Image (cartoon, rainbow, N blue to C red):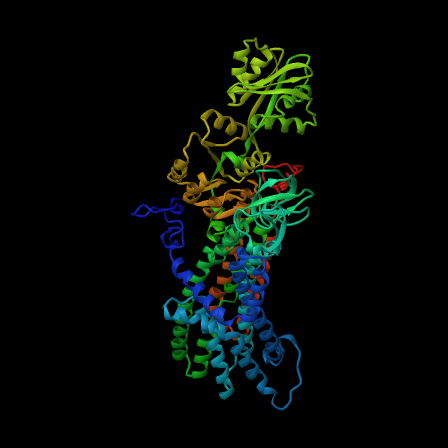
Amino acid sequence: MDDHRHSTDDDGTDDRGRSDATRDDGATDSADAEAEPRTEQSLLEDEADADEAEARVERHGNHGGDDRDHGDHGGMHEGHEEMFRRRFFVSTLLSIPVLLYSETLQDWLGFSVPAFPGSEWINPVFAVLVFAYGGVPFLRMAVPEVRNRSPGMMTLISMAITVAFVYSLASVVFPTTSAFFWELVTLVDVMLLGHWIEMRSVRRASSALDELAELLPDTAERITDGGDTEEVPVNDLEEDDLVLVRPGANVPADGVVEEGDSDVNEAMITGESRPVSKEPGDEVIGGTVNGDGSLRVRITATGDETALAGIMRLVEEAQQSKSQTQVLADRAAGWLFYVAVASAAVTAVAWAVATSSGAAVIERAVTVLVIACPHALGLAIPLVVAINTSLAAQNGMLVRDRIGMEQAREIDTVIFDKTGTLTEGEQGVVDVATVDGLNEDDAFALAAAVEGDSEHMIAEAIREAADERGVAARDAADFEALKGRGVRATVDGETTYVGGPNLLSQLDGDTPSVLADFAERAGENARTVVYLVRDDEPVAAFALADVIRDESYRVVDALHELDVEVAMLTGDSEDVARAVAEELGIDTVFAEVLPEDKDEKVTELQNQGKLVAMVGDGVNDAPALTRADIGIAIGSGTDVAVQSADIILVQNNPLDVVRLVKLSRASYRKMQENLVWAAGYNVFAIPLAAGVLAPVGILLSPAVGALLMSLSTVIVAINAQFLRRIDLELPTLPGLPSSAEPSPSD
């Protein structure tokens, strides 16, 4: 597995983000392979309907500068898809007369069509139209391959349709030879279909984000210095502008709440189904929907700096990346080109020696070249990639690098950042103990009352725990913060304290054994303990810790079921890290790691021969995400972390790592199966077309070869569709009981 690790060049730079040519994992030729999409892209731009693309760009660009570039990109791909779709349907329509008047098909299917004066010209005329309209784009895309002396898919397709076209026209002049008219038109139709599907998969990724861009309102209500509101285009908003977001309205840009309380629906960005409560100081994302409250929001980002614009950039990078298996398919097409030419040459020589018929020699050589056309090979990978893209989007996975998606199948170690990924990233009450005569609800009611006016995170945790229990805080008075010790207030006429061990030392009271034992156990688990004290006597103790997410327990079990080790990386103390690791069943723990040293821990595992995925959400995780073989960013993370990752989990759910591994394995398996079916056809058909079994009376005719070619294409298409049957529902993941309920974030 060492060959999957990121190498470091002599100048100390990491190979990620530089050039795939430095990889040792089979993408050595990706620099050359990626030249083809770039050239193909420019050629497609000339072919696409400019008016359609511009209309779409204008429609999506009305919402502001944040999606303008993306709209141009999405419109361009939609224009390409429209071009291939139009050419496919027109070419297929023009192919119908050729198929109907093909004597071979008439014999096979037992039908006939009426002949009329000039009907003998139907096949050549319509075949020429199909070739000129549907086949010429492939010839143009083959030019750079020929110029660079690196034949690939386009060269092989162009060779097959050109040979079939020229030979078939020759048959009109020399009637003694057979023709390939119906084989020619089906060749062109199937290859157009493959490119249409590929463009559609790319466009769908763009259109999903175009729909997000539609969430941005056209105008915003900006608050003037005098306190009045003015309606302005969203494009005119600037940083530090104050805007009014009315109930039910969309947030016009990223910002921070300055005034007001409301619940905001962020499902379109994060996948979180429950509205998120917002109050002064909380961040809001442009495009999200405000609830029943009114908010005044200070704009912090506009245009290209917004969250939506960042996501659109990620999709653009994903569209420009190339599947590693597609690179392999392209290379296979290059090899197949040389095999076909060599086989045709050997066939011509052998038949020239064996027979004196020049027509037979030409027919055999042409048959080999035509049958070598990669019908199925051209569809094998685009079909799977299209379905993979759809499934990933439906399950909250945004793929920046398709190679990363494919490599996910080989992950044997996943490193999770602790804070904010495995845990909530905030303190919460995880246990409570009380003395006799005081129940837990009363303890929370008293503690929440004392902490009512405190802004400390411990106070917030106690109030939230009380709310979750449905306990109402009692009335408190005379609140006072005791620096370094806790807080004090009067509740029900009695002086009540909440504070840590320093508070007990000051009060100099005895700690009941039940609370002392509780504190000792909490200390062993690296939990913080605060006490509730009444009349100078401790009556309850609360254990607080960074709350572990419910999904974290499940993801560790599920990854273990997939034979993937789990490691945890944190800057917290050894005791805290060990406590979390033991509770979750994590295999390896890296604690007290400085931010600048996190990537060294990734390297440490890679040096053990492991293929490492890193899951994180913060700026401190960016170097580790970059160093890892596969960087996975939690969608709620910072822009820096997201930009450093190969995969983004938009739903902010670590369980999606399991989905990622399962989808990657299933997709790669389908790609391999399709390549076997596609290449298997050529391995089988080319020798038979060459006539290796002619001495025993078995000779593959062009018509039968075309039938086998079509059958191979159908099998590849059906096999790719089976990928949709993969079960990615969380309750049925490995290691989870069938009765498990998904969490709201699912």
Relative to 258, is 141 above or below?
A: below
Q: Which image quarter: residue 386?
A: bottom right
Q: Which of 487 and 364 is in front in this view?
A: 487
Identify the image quadrant of the N terminus: top left
Q: Position of residue 209 (x, y in %)?
A: 57, 55
Total numbered circles: 0
Relative to 597, is 289 above or below?
A: below
Q: In the displayed image of the protein, which residue is found farthest to the bottom? A: 117
Q: Where is residue 374 in the image (x, y as percent from the top left)?
A: 49, 67
Q: Which image quarter: residue 515?
A: top right
Q: Position of residue 269 (x, y in %)?
A: 59, 48
Can residue 350 be seen in the rendering of this structure? Answer: yes
Q: Which of 287 and 675 is in front in this view?
A: 287
Q: Position of residue 438 (x, y in %)?
A: 68, 15
Q: Residue at (52%, 77%) from the top-left corner? A: 131
Left or right of 554? Residue 565 is left
Q: Residue at (53%, 67%) from the top-left corner? A: 80
Identify the image quadrant of the C terminus: top right
Left or right of 592? Residue 702 is right
Relative to 182, is 570 above or below?
A: above
Can residue 694 be seen in the rendering of this structure? Answer: no
Left or right of 592? Residue 389 is right
Relative to 488, is 424 above or below?
A: below
